[in-house]
Image (cartoon, rainbow, N blue to C red):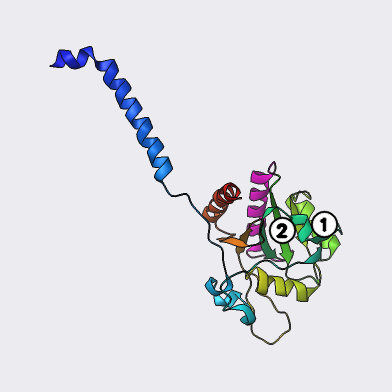
Amino acid sequence: MFSFFKEFKFFWIGFLILSLIIISIFYSILKPKKVLPIYQPSRVNAEMVDSTIQYVSKYHKIADFSLTNQNGKTITQADYKDKIYVADFFFTTCQTICPIMTDHMAQIQKAIMDDDEVMLLSHSVTPQIDSVAQLKHYAMEKGVNDKKWNLVTGDKKQIYELARKSYMAVKTDGNGDEYDMIHTENFMLIDKKKQIRGYYDGTNPDDIDRLLEDIIVLKRED
């Protein structure tokens, strides 16, 4: 009997390899593809969401905007048309979580540098401090590439409404000050249809890895 198997060992080896290939093909076909959720206001932490939209459960998109970047250029939705992008909120004088978040944004920038479909967008929550000159200095210090990453400032009301009504990414301290914002560690992944497809902790290296993986998932979807 052993001589029989020995005589046909190459056949059995080939048969085993072919079987493994067929099984792997069937597995890849039948394995469900990862699909990223579309975040609506009703499924986001209510602390981050303006009360006027907390119960919205469909059709939510990032609103149009007009802000000014580190080069004094006006940045609008047109600059992000047909782009996937990562957004966050920060301020240049922050000494707590912002430096970590900015370093992680720089890491993402490096990973997407040659990818024309993906960009970055960071909004200042202290536009009264973060002038164009201040943003430019910060951008140069942090290695921001102008073609991939815009740091934007502008009208505080508009930034507040973007933060609370579009990206649903910042808290308010409830002290009654108009347009007060407490920025968080959130990074948001936005698709080409201006929809939020993911939230990530911008201070957590594991979340940055997950974000980069989700960008690949989103690109396959689009």
Three-letter residue code for mark 2: Leu
Closer to the camera: disc 2 or disc 1?
Answer: 2
Q: Is residue 62 rendered magenta in the image?
A: no
* Quarter of the rendering containing residue 166: bottom right
- Residues under labels 2 and 1: Cα distance? 14 Å
Tag 2 secondary structure: strand
Image quadrant where residue 170 sits: bottom right
Please, what secondary structure does the residue beneath circle 1 have?
helix
Question: In the displayed structure, does residue 155 sit left or right of residue 1?
Answer: right
Q: Which is the main secondary structure of the residues drawn in magenta?
A: helix
Q: Position of residue 78 (x, y in %)?
A: 78, 58
What are the residue bounds of the magenta stretch? Answer: 91-115
Tell which of 3 and 162 is nearer to you: 3
Q: Does the magenta segment cover residue 112?
A: yes
Query: How many numbered marks have been drawn onto this rendered protein structure?
Result: 2
Q: Which residue is mark 1?
A: 136
Q: Earlier in the sequence, mark 2 or mark 1?
A: 2
- The type of residue carrying mark 1 is Lys
Categorize mark 2 by other alpha carbons within 10 Å: few (<14), some (14-19), many (20+).
Answer: many
Q: Which residue is identified by label 2?
A: 121
